[in-house]
Image (cartoon, rainbow, N blue to C red):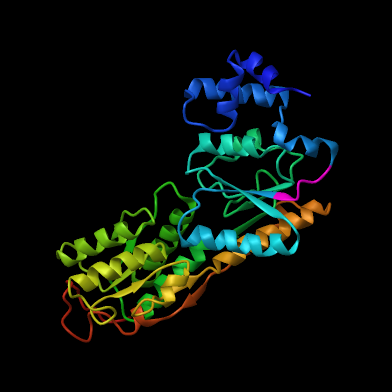
């Protein structure tokens, strides 16, 4: 069994430096950390705290690695995971990759020997990177990631279908100039939602170059989009944000500018976070049932831990549901003069 001293010797560093690198501490240079992690992989080193798993005794702990641990979306995922884990007598060990491939590898390595199974949401990580860093002997389920090339079970949301459905619903309410507030450009969920919006606009109203504003899933991104609309730079009769937080930021900024929702402009979001139903007017959104994303993944992982053989064929794709609420209560900009520039068109 390799020791920490063996890892340090292989990497050509001190034992203290090797320990800091393995534990993800910041006072280690990138080249040094890479050398240490390569030594860990080469020697198949397992941290001492998880050594009991080497004797085939369970830790009763599940590793959960997410791009972030803050915000209602991720808290709902963790809540869904914990509901199932708690009933099964399992504990959770949380890890945050901060959207970084490098940090993903470090967090995965830090889980080795400490957990019986792994739940991982790696939206920006290439399959080859996961293949190089995941332990084939560690039961793993991926969230919001198409693991077909890795033959791992996964749970994902049909973001394309959800965005298409929402755009179609706004068009049916009379909207023609729909502005989309996109999510981070490298985020797979955001890209699929933008693609669903664009395809619906092209097919249903013949608009092949719809207005798409940049966003990052934050409330401030939604507020900034609203500022552009209020300044009269963009005509719009509806706004479809790629997530609820941006939609909420947009609504608050519009209200501050005296623009009424939905009378002057309709607003819709995606995810159905708990806050969506408590604002006034309540937010029209695509309900993902975020906690179900986590609970379904946890149930798949429990099956793996029982010895079931699961692969990509065991994938679960959750279809979002349209929840129509107050922010799309009437056709925007058609019944009265809108404070935001709009162009009234005849519905085909």
Q: Nearer the viewer, residue 316 or 93?
A: 93
Q: Is residue 312 above or below residue 268?
A: above
Query: At x 34% / y 71%, what residue is drawn?
Result: 205
Instruction: Give the residue at the far bottom of this rendering.
Output: 335
Query: At x 35% / y 62%, what residue is drawn?
Result: 246
Query: At x 54% / y 33%, what residue is drawn?
Result: 24
Residue 107 lies in the magenta stretch: no
Query: At x 18% / y 72%, what residue is drawn?
Result: 340
* Quarter that holds the N terminus: top right
Query: How many marks do you count on the picture?
Result: 0
Q: Is residue 152 above or below residue 314?
A: above
Say whether residue 42 is visible. yes
* Quarter that holds the C terminus: bottom left
Picture quadrant of residue 290: bottom right
Residue 222 position within the rendered picture, expressed as x and y whole percent measured from the top left? 31, 61
Q: Is residue 29 left or right of residue 335?
A: right
Residue 330 position within the rendered picture, expressed as x and y whole percent measured from the top left? 31, 85
Q: Is residue 274 left or right of residue 12?
A: left
Magenta part mainly helix, strand or loop? loop
Picture quadrant of residue 133: top right
Residue 68 position within the rendered picture, expressed as x and y whole percent measured from the top left? 49, 50
Say whether residue 209 is visible. no
Q: Is residue 158 above or below residue 327?
A: above
Residue 59 lies in the magenta stretch: yes
Residue stretch in magenta: 57-61
Picture quadrant of residue 209: bottom left
Residue 117 position within the rendered picture, expressed as x and y whole percent measured from the top left? 72, 47
């Amino acid at each position: 069994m390799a020791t920490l001293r063996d890892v340090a010797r292989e990497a050509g560093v001190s034992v203290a430096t090797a320990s800091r690198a393995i534990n993800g501490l910041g006072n280690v240079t990138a080249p040094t950390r890479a050398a240490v992690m390569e030594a860990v992989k080469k020697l198949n080193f397992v941290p001492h705290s998880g050594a009991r798993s080497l004797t085939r005794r369970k830790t009763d702990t599940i590793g959960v690695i997410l791009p972030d641990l803050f915000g209602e979306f991720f808290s709902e995922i963790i809540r869904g995971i914990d509901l199932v884990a708690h009933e099964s007598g399992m504990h959770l060990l949380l890890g945050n990759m901060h959207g970084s491939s490098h940090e993903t590898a470090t967090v995965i390595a830090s889980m080795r020997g400490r957990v019986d199974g792994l739940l991982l949401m790696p939206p920006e990580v290439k399959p080859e990177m996961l293949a190089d860093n995941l332990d084939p002997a560690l039961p793993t389920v991926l969230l919001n990631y198409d693991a077909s090339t890795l033959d791992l079970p996964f749970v994902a949301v049909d973001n394309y279908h959800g965005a298409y459905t929402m755009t179609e619903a706004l068009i049916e309410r009379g909207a023609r100039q729909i502005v989309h507030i996109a999510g981070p450009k490298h985020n797979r969920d955001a890209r699929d939602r933008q693609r669903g919006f664009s395809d619906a606009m092209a097919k249903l109203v013949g608009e092949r170059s719809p207005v798409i504003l940049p966003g990052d899933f934050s409330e401030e991104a939604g507020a900034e989009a609203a500022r552009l609309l209020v300044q009269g730079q963009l005509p719009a009769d509806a706004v479809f944000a790629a997530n609820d937080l941006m939609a909420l930021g947009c609504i608050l900024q519009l209200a501050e500018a005296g623009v009424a929702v939905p009378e002057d402009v309709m607003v819709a979001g995606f995810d159905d976070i708990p806050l969506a139903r408590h604002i006034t007017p309540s937010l029209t959104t695509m309900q993902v049932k975020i906690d179900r994303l986590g609970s379904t993944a946890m149930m798949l992982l429990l099956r793996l831990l029982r010895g079931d053989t699961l692969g990509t064929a065991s994938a679960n794709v959750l279809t979002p549901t349209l929840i129509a609420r107050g922010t799309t209560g009437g056709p925007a900009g058609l019944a009265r003069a809108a404070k935001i520039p709009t162009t009234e068109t005849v519905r085909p």
